[in-house]
Amino acid sequence: MNKIALQVDGLRKVYANGNIALHGISLAVPEGSFFALLGPNGAGKTTMINILADILHPGEGTMTLFGRDVFQEKSWCKRQMGIVPQEVAFDPFFSVREILNTTSGYYGCRPDRVWIDELLDRLGLTHQADKNTRQLSGGMRRRLLVAQALVHRPPLVVLDEPTAGVDVELRRRLWDFMRELNRNGATILLTTHYLAEAEELCDHVAIIDQGKLVASEPMQSLMHRVAVSRLVLRYAKPILISATDEAALTDFKPVILDEGLELHLELRRDEPGMSGFDVAYEAARNRFGPPLDAAVHQEDLEDVFVRLTGNTGAEGETHVQR
């Protein structure tokens, strides 16, 4: 059985104005996983992270980190975490290297100069190391946030929207570094509104909406359970479906398109040696003849997210901020 890095049980948070941010959330983050925590604006993700970081107090529920009570053993638990928040705030008169040296002390350890140099190199901060933070661009300050969270080599790294508004170079550097840390045993907890990144990077996912847990399971399991594939067939002339055609294709939930037909593919095999694609294609071919072409459209994490939460963002991009 996999060990659990972070266990959340019955976590509930009600603000003074009566707004319920978390409705008794329970989930488990497996040790060594790359875990996506997703949800639309106001879902409660950042509230949960702030409770974990001891910035907010919960109303009810428990949290354990590597088997230790987060609320009862705060000092120990804080040393096991490195949190990259959304907000950027540094002393403007400290240099990048001074910030990292000082942060090491906050976690009760001496500055590890070799590790700090590696962090500076991996995050593209080497040439900024002796600059005061007020001289840094916004992107460089966000890189420093990541280095600061990693300076004490925490076994749990929490990334709260780490690539929001940053350049492609930082994204690539960050994800390459996070993958390496994860391969070496670190547990990564990520919130992001870039769902393509989450699907590519993460092996587990939890989705919360309006403070309630919608799903929490391995990424592959969620996609197999919820995502669907559709077979799109293009014909030379418009398709007209009779009642008989509808009955013959009822298992595939046929949808008429401007230039053809769309069929829902189930993840099953009706006959030996035939996939869902084969069965659907033959069923349509028997009714309407051979199509001009055929293509399978596989739903991605964004499609699944929209189906489970009903939330979409502008310009076709799903936004799942705090």
Image (cartoon, helix red, strand yellow):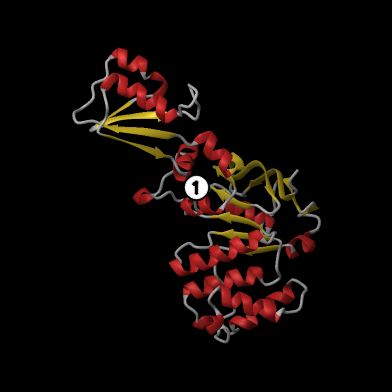
Q: Nearer the viewer, residue 218 or 48?
A: 218
Q: Is residue 247 above or below residue 113?
A: above
Q: Position of residue 56 (x, y in %)?
A: 67, 56
Q: Which residue matches tag 1?
A: 40
The x, y position of residue 8, in whole percent, is 70, 46
Seen at 41% across and 45% down, the residue is: 312
Name the residue: 43% across, 35% down: 229
Q: Vertically, is 14 above or below 273?
A: below
Residue at 75 percent across and 43 percent down: it is 1
Question: Hey, what amino acid is under mark 1?
Answer: Pro
In the image, farthest residue toward the left: 237
Left or right of 24? Residue 232 is left
> On the picture, is 165 further left or further right than 19?
left
User: From this viewpoint, is residue 322 visible?
Assistant: no
Q: How many marks?
A: 1
293 above or below 20? above
Residue 238 percent coordinates (x, y): 20, 27
Residue at 27% over, 19% down: 241
Which element is circle 1 on? loop
Give the image location of residue 113, x and y in percent. Answer: 69, 81
Q: Quadrant of residue 228?
A: top left
Tell which residue pokes out farthest to the bottom in this image: 130
Q: Residues within 10 Å of mark 1 (few under 14, many from 20)?
A: many
User: 131 and 233: which one is in front?
Assistant: 233
The answer to whether any part of residue 162 appears in the image is yes
